[in-house]
Image (tube, grey):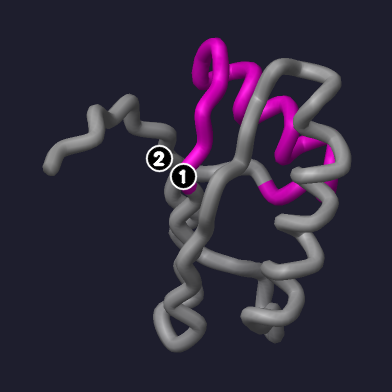
Amino acid sequence: MDVHEKLPDGATAADVAKAHEADLAKQGEYGVEYKRYWVDEQAGKVFCLVEAPDAETAARVHREAHGLVADHIYEVAEGS
């Protein structure tokens, strides 16, 4: 799970959707799968659920796709 603490000024949920589409277009090159994302537009935060070989590879997809690299990446396990 990655966390973007502060979106660029003026960024909207629609902008995040476009960035996510760019991730989807790039992810296959690196064995990464950006599965879902959540936006808190008021707080300017975004949370992305991603499966990747490692944190750096996940970050690389964001960096190359749109340049908005997460502030934090947490390795999480799915619960029931």
Indicate whether residue 71 is drawn in magenta: no
Residue 1 is marked as 2
Residue 74: percent from left, percent from top: 34, 32
Q: Please tell me how many numbered marks the rendered image carries.
A: 2
Q: Residue at 75% across / 74% down in the picture?
A: 15
Q: Secondary structure at mark 1?
A: strand
The quarter of the rendered structure image containing the N terminus is top left
Left or right placement of residue 68 versus residue 22 in this view = left
Residue 39 is marked as none
The mark nearer the N terminus, 1 or 2, is 2
Q: Residue at 63% across / 80% down in the picture?
A: 13
Residue 50 position (above or below residue 7): above
Q: Secondary structure at mark 2?
A: loop
- State which region is magenta: 49-68
Q: Foreground residue, 31 or 5?
A: 31
Residue 3: percent from left, percent from top: 44, 50
Residue 49 is marked as 1
Q: Residue at 72% across / 26% down in the picture?
A: 60
The quarter of the rendered structure image containing the C terminus is top left
Give the residue type that dot 1 points to.
Leu
Residue 34 position (above or below residue 36): above
Give the residue type that dot 2 points to.
Met
* Tag 1 near tag 2, CB within 8 Å: yes
Left or right placement of residue 49 versus residue 24 in this view = left
Residue 12: percent from left, percent from top: 66, 83
Q: Measure how far apart labels 1 and 2 are at the Cα level.
A: 5 Å
Most extreme residue toward the left is 80
